[in-house]
Amino acid sequence: MTRAARLLLILLVVFATATAAARTRNVTDPDAPRSLPADGPVSVQWSDPSEFTDLKFSGNRWRAAQGDWVYQLAEHLRDTAAERLPEGERMDVTITDIGRAGRYEPWHGMRLQDVRILRDHYPPSMKLEFRHYGADGSVLAEGSRELRDTGYLMGGSNIGGQNNLYYEKRMIDEWVRDELRRTSVASH
C-alpha cells in the first residue's frame, strides 16, 4: 500500500468516526437510556419517548426528537426531589408522558419550521407515577399525577433563553414542592 493510499485510508476512518460522533442525539434512539443511573434517594425512569405527546403532536416530529431533553428533565426531577426529601426517605418516579411547552408550526414556512412557538394553548405537561417511601420503608404516598402549567406564560419568563426547558423544569419544581409538602403534612 502506498503512502498516499494509507494517508487517504486514515483520513477516511477519521472522517467516518467524526461523522458518527457528530450525529445528532435522538431521544428515540434504541440505545438511548430509559432511566437515570442509581444515585441517591430518588430513582427516575421513563417509558418510550416515541409515544410521548411531545413527539406525536409536535408539528415537527423529527426536530422534537432531537437532543437529550428527556434525560435533562429526569435529572432535574431527581435533583429537585432529592434536595427536598427528608433524610432517609426515598422516591421512585416513572415518567409516562411529556409534552414540552410550545409546538412547531410548519405552516409558517421554511424559515420557522424548526422554531418552537410558545402559545397559551401549548402548555408544558407531564404524566408520571411515583412512590414515596419513609425512612422505615413504609409507603408514605403513591399514585399517578398529571402535571400541566396552563399559565406558564403568565409566570416568570425565560429571559435570555439560556434554558430551553425552563417552563418544564418550573412545572416539575412546583409538583415536587407541593407533593412533598402534602406528604409532610399527612405524616404529621
Image: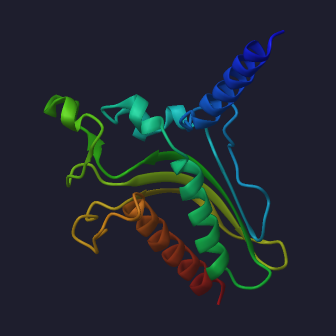
Q: Residue at x 56, y 56 (%)?
A: 72
- Between 27 and 7, the residue placed more toward the observer is 7
Left or right: 45 as drawn, with respect to 58: right
Left or right: 15 as drawn, with respect to 97: right
Count up the numbered dots. 0
- The percent position of residue 134, horizontal first and vertical second, equals 76, 77
Give residue 84's quadrant in the image. bottom right
Residue extending farthest top:
1
- The percent position of residue 91, horizontal first and vertical second, equals 70, 67
Residue extending farthest front:
3
Q: Is residue 90 above or below residue 123?
A: below
Left or right: 23 as drawn, with respect to 148: right
Of the 4 image quadrants, the one containing the C terminus is: bottom right
Residue extending farthest bottom:
188
- Between 153 and 160, the residue placed more toward the observer is 160
- The percent position of residue 34, horizontal first and vertical second, equals 68, 43
Q: Residue at x 76, y 85 (%)?
A: 87
Left or right: 68 as drawn, with respect to 114: right
Q: Residue at x 28, y 64 (%)?
A: 152
- The percent position of residue 20, horizontal first and vertical second, equals 64, 29
Q: Residue at x 28, y 70 (%)?
A: 159
Of the 4 image quadrants, the one containing the N terminus is: top right
Give residue 38's quadrant in the image. bottom right
- Between 129 and 138, the residue placed more toward the observer is 129
